[in-house]
Image (tube, rainbow, N blue to C red):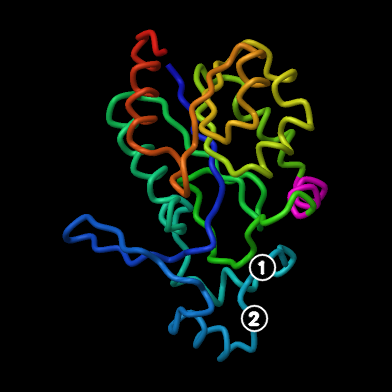
Amino acid sequence: MRVTIITEDSGVKLPAIDRYHGTIGKGVKLSQHTQLNQVLQENKLNIPSDDIEQESVYRTVLKDFIRPAKLMFAGMFSEVRLFYEELKKRYNDVELLIISGRYGIVNGEEENIPYDFHLESYELIRELDDRTNFFDELIKKIRSSDYIIISLGKELVLYLLDKGFLDVVGSHPQLIFVTSSMFKDKIIEAGHIFLQKTGVARIREENKRRIMAILEGESVG
């Protein structure tokens, strides 16, 4: 069984990694990261944003800050990362896809530079799609999945639905949306699963349990 999680990046990045204890810290806004800003200032560069044309320059200058995407983001993203790692212990084929304001679609295991460009509006999402074609790339990547767990903010879910995501996917793979109730009827009418997003949490524990039950073939009310 192939399971894919789709989430978005975070404005809080570069959490400290304690490999000895196996823990990951809270992360910071890049503007507050002393070491990163010192390196950038020494090279007369700004914090990376959506300036993808500068990628090779930044990869050279920020080589010590490059890390897998799953370890780049912090804040509420950490909830998704932990769930991803939990699923990997149970299932052989689990993928984490992140909608990134800089790159479009990135795999959670893919190494990237830190950047400061979060998708805060519908217009920025549309511009990202124009630049990276992330919608079509996303469809290609999920075709072979059996279950897709989607934990995205309102604007991204709205954009996907406006682009005809539910029609393009059809009845397979099974979609599990953790999102706002404003999308509930449309998701259920399309034959997919809606779970209520609460507060700032991207998934929350109750929804994790329900998703696990779904993956294990149990009926969930």
Q: Quadrant of the C terminus?
A: top left
189 over 126 or under it: above or below: above
Furthest residue to the bottom?
42
Q: Position of residue 158 (x, y in %)?
A: 71, 37
Please give the name of the residue rendered at 37% of the width and 23% of the height, measured from the top-left corner: 210
Asked if the residue under mark 2 is in contact with the one under mark 1, i.e. CB atoms within 8 Å, the reply is yes
Please give the name of the residue rendered at 48% of the width and 64% of the height, measured from the top-left corner: 12
Q: Foreground: 43 or 196?
A: 196
Q: CA distance from mark 1 to mark 2?
A: 8 Å
Please give the name of the residue rendered at 48% of the width and 80% of the height, measured from the top-left corner: 32
Which label was assigned to residue 49?
1
Inspect the image, locate mark 2, and give the three-letter code of the amino acid beneath it: Asn
Which label was assigned to residue 46?
2
Mark 1 neighbour class, 10 Å CA radius: few under 14, some 14 to 19, many 20 or more: some
Inspect the image, locate mark 1, and give the three-letter code of the amino acid beneath it: Ser
Q: Quadrant of residue 162?
A: top right
Mark 2 neighbour class, 10 Å CA radius: few under 14, some 14 to 19, many 20 or more: few
Please give the name of the residue rendered at 58% of the width and 16% of the height, measured from the top-left corner: 192
Magenta segment: 124-132
Q: Position of residue 197 (x, y in %)?
A: 49, 37
Q: Foreground: 51 or 23?
A: 23
Q: Main structural element of the magenta stretch: helix, strand or loop?
A: helix
Q: Position of residue 137 (x, y in %)?
A: 69, 35
Q: Quadrant of residue 179?
A: top right
In reply to whether residue 131 is colored magenta, the answer given is yes
SS for callout 2: loop
Q: How many marks?
A: 2
Which label was assigned to residue 168?
none
150 over 133 or under it: above or below: above
Left-right relation of 58 to 149: right
Q: Quadrant of residue 144?
A: top right
